[in-house]
Image (cartoon, rainbow, N blue to C red):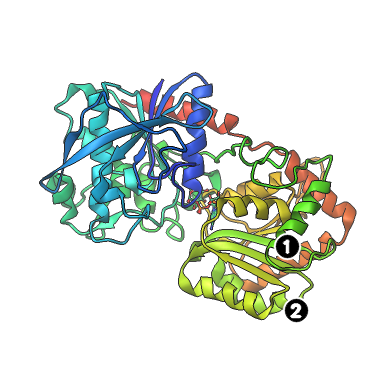
Amino acid sequence: MKIAFVSSEVFPYAKTGGLADVAGSLPIELAKLGHEVKVFMPNYNSIDHNKYFINRREDIPEFPVRVGGWDRNVKLYNGFLPNSNVEIIFIDHPYYFHRNKIYTNNWDEDERFILFQKGMIESLQRLQWKPDIIHCNDWQTGLIPLLIKDNYKWDRFFDNIAFVYTIHNIAYQGRFGKDTLLRAEIDEKFFNPPGIIEHDGDVNFMKAAIMMSEVVNTVSNTYAKELLTSEYGAGMENYLKYREQDFYGIINGIDYDIWNPEKDKLIPYHYSIDNFEGKKKNKQFLAEKFGLSYHEDIPLIGIISRMVSQKGFDIIAPIMNDLMKMNIQLVVLGSGESHYQSLFNQFAYYYPNKVGAYIGFNNELSHLIEAGSDIFLMPSHYEPCGLNQIYSLKYGTVPVVRKTGGLADTVQDWNEYNSYGMNIGNGFSFYDYSSSALLQSIKRAVNDFHNKPVWEKIIRNGMVKDYSWKHSAEEYVDLYKKAVQKI
Ligand code: ADP
Ligand code: GLC
């Protein structure tokens, strides 16, 4: 099959979260299964063209793309995803994409991604490369099915393309005022009730994708079920129920070439399940980097996260003082809402030997925290898939998570047994979104940390489990086949 994979972020070029990891690795896995894949993303100015051998596609002259009645000139650049033959096409328009940020709160955020989507569509025309599947991800690509099925339907080139839409996070829907219709040149009939692009009086990119794609999925089974409820569906639940027959959950895979303690290029000491010494050295290296004294017997807890309420900071904040009374250390890497940032800065200031905080984005440090921590904290309010807990399992770093979404599908509590009565626990989890439930789980984890045979078993259960992409990529291929059958 020919698959066009469209994403607003792709690792290693530009990343704010897990979507980039998925977009940088799933296409390679699909190519390994014999499919022809091209990836499309915007050409942000932060992307290092020299480092990643990115060049102008000179064979395609600059072309105009209309946004809000204006012709915006688009250039195409290309490269190949690292160690692969998967071409990645960068849609370039400096006015929109050279803003030192992937996402902005600027008034023309809608236009930025309208240009990206139309630019992507028109680049298919120019490249004369017709995919069987266009795989769209999150709101920034949500208009593509509607645009192709309506605005571009005059061009028979687009006949018989099937659309797959993956929801990585329901909270970000691409909601804009009605005037966005004009900017995208979308017919008003799609807005008027029960319009496929209208929700709560706004234009909603995600809804348009849910309604117009042959197949819709999200990134874990539990989250797929949760999304059908009003508690988690963020207003999209009824549309998803309407599409329930075509709505699936596929857990994300992990790129074990990048996230693997046996060969991770970004950590100082390699280690494996059979040779764990390197992990202790990483712990010491990490502790000292943050100015914390190193103690083999004091559990070091790590957090790596976008600092937004999704990730559970509202239940962490009230127990910070309780945590400080325990014999633990905490390192935090993240950025986002300022009150969360200052929370950790303050605790790092008042407890310099207990808390280390790095506010910002730092890829190398994220690998070191996975490798050097004993426990990983991820008490998310909701979590479509979550990658850090899966990285943690591989790095022998025991996750403490809230049992929701992908966290529930990947982390089993140490108290859980399989049908053969075997203890399959690889971490600690709790249901209630409450500080007390979280604190109790952390205390259980810290207790078992001191019980060496139990701790080793928990670590082993996590490290032996295979979360590589192969299986999930095969599930995507099945999904693509289902989508093709629907046209
Ligand atoms: P989400 O996509 O919701 O942020 P995931 O767990 O799926 O959550 O993925 C987060 C990804 O972003 C992981 O690869 C994680 O290591 C990375 N990440 C998050 N915050 C930072 C940060 N401040 N610095 C470096 N990497 C980060
Ligand atoms: C989103 C979700 C996260 C998921 C990632 C990749 O950002 O918040 O849970 O792992 O996308 O699918």
**Residue type at tag 1:** Ala
Q: Which circle marks residue 361 in the picture? A: none
Q: Is the residue 342 above or below the residue 477 in the image? A: below
Of the two numbered discs 1 and 2 in the rendering, the one whose residue sits closer to the viewer: 1
The residue closer to the viewer here, 233 or 77, is 77
Answer with the quarter of the image where residue 103 lies.
bottom left
Answer with the quarter of the image where residue 4 lies.
top left
Pointer 2: residues within 10 angstroms few (<14), some, or many (20+)?
Answer: few
Position in image of residue 183 (x %, y %): 16, 49
Sequence-wise first label, 1 or 2:
1
How many numbered circles are shown? 2
- Residue on which disc 1 sits: 287
User: From the viewer's perspective, is 116 left or right of 102?
Assistant: left
- Residue on which disc 2 sits: 325
Instruction: Quadrant for the C terminus, please.
Output: top left
Answer with the quarter of the image where residue 62 lies.
top left
Q: Let me know if residue 365 appears in the view.
A: yes
Q: Is the residue 116 above or below the residue 435 in the image? A: above
**Point 71% across, 42% down: residue:** 261
User: From the viewer's perspective, is 99 left or right of 69?
Assistant: right
Pointer 1: residues within 10 angstroms few (<14), some, or many (20+)?
Answer: many
Dot 2 falls on a residue whose secondary structure is helix
Q: Is the residue 114 above or below the residue 309 in the image? A: above
Position in image of residue 284 (x %, y %): 77, 58
**Point 84% across, 61% down: residue:** 296
**Residue type at tag 2:** Lys
Q: Let me know if residue 198 appears in the view.
A: no
**Point 16% across, 52% down: residue:** 192
Q: Whole-Å distance between the Cαs marked 1 and 2?
A: 19 Å
